[in-house]
Image (cartoon, rainbow, N blue to C red):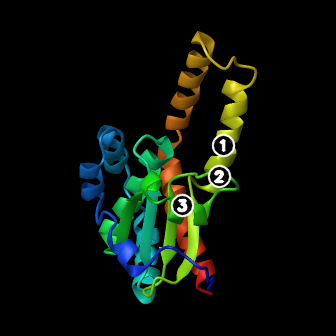
């Protein structure tokens, strides 16, 4: 089990939104995107059960850093919401920009990529963290960026059309990426608890 110095204390953890509904009520926009991804996601029962068994055995706690404007957060945060609601695993949602000290602990290289999802045991000992999207989705995003956005001007109608095509194709993968997210969580939990 990894050990890190962290700004995440029991008090800080407790200050996060305690549910998906509380998160939705606290944000100022994009509720429809979050809600649609939430409605569209049905977790795979066997993986959900495995996640719950691991979580219950270790008193799992989860902290999520996100922002309402980010498409990866629209897709990823509802996955966690469904998982934690179905397993009764304790979760807290924090706004990234209001929690820079925590975010700085979990950079993606030099970037503050979100969602950042941090897994802890019952005593808030760090287990692992997960950033943005599943690995397979990262690979596909890179492929789609090359396909749609290579040699495109930085602004204007051509850029707007390319971005629209890029986003449309990404949306076609949302369901499979949601399922891959739970698969990665289970795999990383097993690995971190060995």
Mark 2 vs 1: CB contact within 8 A = yes
Q: Up-down: is 111 above or below 33?
A: below
Tell me if 140 is positioned left or right of 120 in this view: right
Q: Up-down: is 52 above or below 26?
A: below
Q: Nearer the viewer, mark 1 or mark 3?
A: 3
Please state the horizontal and vertical placement of residue 181, each as a whole percent of the image: 52, 59
Please state the horizontal and vertical placement of residue 186, each as a whole percent of the image: 53, 72
- Measure the C-alpha gap from mark 1 to mark 3: 26 Å
Residue that carries the numbered disc 3 in the rendered image:
103
Secondary structure beneath dot 1 equals helix
Residue that carries the numbered disc 1 in the rendered image:
140
Tell me if 68 is positioned left or right of 115 in this view: left
Among the two numbered marks 1 and 3 on one chain, the one whose residue lies closer to the N terminus:
3
- Front position in the image: 177 or 154: 154
Residue that carries the numbered disc 2 in the rendered image:
136
Say which residue appears at 51% left-offset and 29% top-offset: 168
């Amino acid at each position: 089990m990894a050990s890190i110095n962290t700004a995440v204390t029991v008090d800080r953890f407790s200050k996060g939104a305690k549910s998906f509904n509380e998160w939705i009520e606290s944000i100022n926009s994009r509720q429809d995107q979050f809600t649609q991804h939430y409605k569209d996601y049905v977790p795979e029962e066997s993986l959900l059960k495995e996640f719950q068994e691991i979580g219950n055995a270790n008193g799992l706690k989860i902290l999520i850093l996100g922002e309402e404007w980010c498409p990866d957060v629209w897709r990823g945060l509802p996955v966690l919401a469904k998982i934690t609601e179905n397993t009764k695993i304790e979760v807290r949602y924090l706004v990234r920009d209001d929690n820079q000290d925590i975010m700085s602990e979990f950079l993606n290289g030099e970037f503050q990529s979100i969602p950042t999802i941090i897994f802890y045991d019952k005593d808030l000992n760090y287990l692992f963290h997960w950033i943005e999207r599943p690995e397979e989705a990262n690979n596909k995003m890179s492929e789609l960026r090359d396909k749609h956005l290579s040699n495109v001007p930085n602004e204007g109608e051509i850029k707007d059309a390319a971005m629209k095509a890029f986003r449309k194709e990404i949306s076609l993968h949302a369901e499979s990426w949601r399922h891959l997210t739970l698969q990665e969580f289970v795999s990383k939990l097993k690995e971190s608890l060995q």
